Amino acid sequence: MIPALFPLVRPLLHALDAETAHGLTVGALARLPLRQPPADDPRLCVTVISRQFPNPIGLAAGFDKGAQAPDALLGLGFGFVEVGGVVPRPQPGNPRPRVFRLPEDGAVINRFGLNSEGLDVVRARLAARRDRPGIVGVNIGANKDATDRLADYVACTRGLAGLVDFITVNVSSPNTPGLRDLQGEAFLDDLLARVVAARDEAGAGTAVLLKIAPDIGLDGLDAMTATARRRGIDALVVSNTTVARPASLRGASRAETGGLSGRPLFSPATRLLAETFLRVGAGLPLIGVGGVDSAEAAWTKIRAGASLVQLYSALVYAGPGLVGEIKAGLVRRMEAEGLRSLAQFVGRDAAELARTA
């Protein structure tokens, strides 16, 4: 029902500024009665990070920052949902306006600045749904004015471990000053060691993931992947939004500062994904994010090395029906290739896509 209504409500939503429209959407989803997700073709099932995902299509962090509607989102057909980002203390983020549509480019620019209701609020919501089915993760960060950012990540890990299936350590948001500095090798090593220790102390089976930026060089990628493996990280999320502005952008808001997501991010994020797979192989699962707006785009992420795929910006333009379209397209491609499992295709063309994506 909801996907069918989107063509009718889209003009109304797009007549509003992007953040207002987004807030209304999340609020409406939070008020919906819970419903069972549609049954997935068993060939779409993916087993990674010690969990069985009914399908590989997930919702990226940033859509449901406060964990208001994870179960309603799972009911739309996502195989998993990542809420957040969450920081320990409530913070308003950057001044509005701070999110801009670029419809000509199928893109979005945001500079939210990790606006969050804070750890206590999000923890209470996740605790209330703890026994419900469905795979839910949470993206964590540090307060903008934190004097000890590593301690902020530890606090979020301690507060949320055991309430979610995975925690994503976000050191790659471009909208919090200095946050990407934590991608440096020494900082990252210390950070991941503390987060993993906090997870282990909680005695939870929660997986720890690391989300990286698309703007790092290959030397930086070498260091990050080595550190992630050494510290026992369960998966890498590739990638966050970019501060780059391709010359091809046409949208009127293309000069706005912030992180660019959507279709223009597809090629650089996919190249980085492929380069990451070439470094870690099948030993460290990858989640491919950035510019996924079709079954073909999702399939390319899988060929580049992704076991799972996330999307967000494409929903602004295509609506929730896109999730079912992508899953159906993946099944058709599997049938054409004679595949019984998507795992058979993960990373098959990584070397080629590292050069050409």
Image (cartoon, helix red, strand yellow):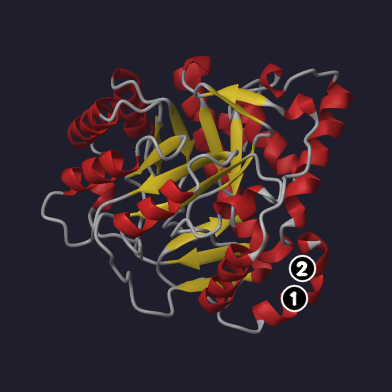
> Amino acid type of disc 1?
Val
Mark 1 touches mark 2? (CB < 8 Å): yes
Whole-percent x, y for residue 107 in the image: 60, 63
Above/below status of 347 relative to 21: above
Q: Quadrant of residue 304?
A: top right
Q: Distance between the residues labelled 1 and 2?
A: 5 Å
**Which residue does the image show at 60% across and 22% down from the upper left?**
47
Which residue in the structure is indicated by mark 1?
9
**Which residue does the image show at 53% across and 78% down from the upper left?**
20
**Which residue does the image show at 66% across and 63% down from the upper left?**
32
For label 2, the SS is helix
Q: Is residue 284 left or right of residue 24?
A: left
For label 1, the SS is helix
Which residue in the structure is indicated by mark 2?
6
Whole-percent x, y for residue 308 in the image: 60, 33
**Which residue does the image show at 61% across and 67% down from the upper left?**
31
Whole-percent x, y for residue 228 in the image: 33, 26
Above/below status of 198 relative to 124: above
